[in-house]
Amino acid sequence: MAASGFEGFEKRLELRFSWHYPARDWLGLRRIEFHHLERVLALVQCTVVSAVGNGFFDAYVLSESSMFVYPTRVIIKTCGTTQLLRSVCPFILLAADLGLTICSCRYTRGSFMFPELQPFPHGSFKDEVSYLEDRLPAALSDRKSSVLRSNNMAHHCWHVFTATGCARLGYVTGDGSYTIEVCMTELDRASAGRFYPTGIMEGCSISKAMTRATGIGDINPRALICDFAFEPCGYSMNGIDGDRYSTIHVTPEEGFSYASYECNGSVHDAKDEITWVLRKVAQVFGPGSMSVSITGVSQEVWARIGGSLEALALKCCDRSDDEFPGAGTVIFRTFTRMTRSETTTGGYNGW
Ligand SMILES: C[S@@+](CC[C@H](N)C(=O)[O-])C[C@H]1O[C@@H](n2cnc3c(N)ncnc32)[C@H](O)[C@@H]1O
């Protein structure tokens, strides 16, 4: 790995809100004026590079990853040396002005490639947790922080903090919805090379050409894609499909290559939909290592996903699960590319 480079691993924050009775309107947080969002993002140290919305939510591609604003939920994911947690207090205040009270907070991230470059409080998980503990209202009393470890790949640990106020604040769990977060490193060089603009792409939008040429556009053909190509390399996209979002961010530079995929879904979706999606994601990037974290699905769904990645020569080398009060179970798996001998001898080590 390079001594120093762009930090691809994102920090992700999800804040959910409930209405003060009797206030309620169908736009909720989507009423926050754009200049207020820009001020919050300035604190985090990133900007909006493009935006799209539908009847359910607004999706923003940021200079460092993405933000999704639903009527009662905001998801913000930022990479590099951004200070994501500085957005917590402003969002709580902006929501309060609209009659919304925070009822849950979830913060997740992988292990940084260059932790020494992270500004406070992101230099350590302990500082991040203290920062959140100090700023969240006491009513979010069910709290837990945990690091789900990968024994075989020390650089693929999953850091999770949750705080909920449960039913008394209107927070609902167990509705069958889930979120998948995928982090991939050591991207196949040919695949990573497609995220550098080339002369062949002249004459049409570079980002659209990347979406098409890489196969990203086929992951969910129903989704409206808002994509962005960085100079001299790099790519981000948000997909919107009804109330579902998906997002991909790519750092293609050799030595610290990284790509992430994230989407939300429901256990009531077609049985093999998520399996197909993850297979396609693995095919697009050809990662040497891949971690998958899911909140809200059963072990049975996991077994299907694992079997399908194995068929792409990715073996599960670690598993770690943890229960979070009021927030459900987080399942974390890490995979590595099989060696040639493992693929020929069927080296699958079980799920
Ligand atoms: C696509 S952005 C999104 C970050 C995402 N979390 C990731 O690393 O996969 C990161 C890539 O864009 C490149 N890049 C170029 N200009 C950038 C900018 N102003 N801000 C962030 N990334 C930029 C980086 O070198 C890197 O390859």
Image (cartoon, grey):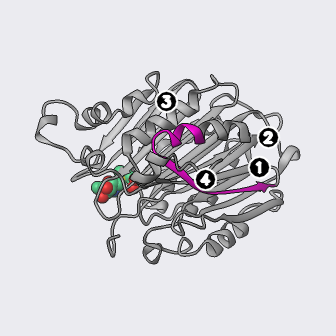
Q: Is residue 341 left or right of residue 189?
A: right
Dot placed on the residue nearer the N-terminal end, 1 or 3:
3
Q: Is residue 77 visible?
A: yes
Q: Is residue 231 left or right of residue 60?
A: left
Q: Amino acid at mark 1?
A: Ala
In the rendered view, would you say 123 is above or below 275? below
Q: Name the residue beneath numbered marker 2.
A: 173
How far apart in space, not on screen, are marks 1 and 3 (Cα)? Answer: 25 Å
How far apart in space, not on screen, are marks 4 and 1 (Cα)? Answer: 19 Å
Dot placed on the residue nearer the N-terminal end, 4 or 1:
1
Q: Residue at x 72, y 70 (%)?
A: 134
Q: Amino acid at mark 3?
A: Ile
Pointers 4 and 1 in contact (CB under 8 A)?
A: no
Q: Is residue 200 left or right of residue 340?
A: left
Dot placed on the residue nearer the N-terminal end, 2 or 4:
2
Q: Name the residue beneath numbered marker 1.
A: 327
Residue 175 placement (x, y as % from top left): 77, 33
Figure quadrant of residue 265: top right
Q: Name the residue beneath numbered marker 3.
A: 240
How far apart in space, not on screen, are marks 2 and 3 (Cα)? Answer: 23 Å
Single out the mark in the foreground, 1 or 3: 1
Q: Residue at x 56, y 66 (%)?
A: 152
How far apart in space, not on screen, are marks 2 and 4 (Cα)? Answer: 23 Å
How far apart in space, not on screen, are marks 1 and 2 (Cα)? Answer: 7 Å
Residue 29 placement (x, y as % from top left): 62, 39
Single out the mark in the foreground, 4 or 1: 4
Q: Name the residue beneath numbered marker 4.
A: 333
Q: Amino acid at mark 4?
A: Arg
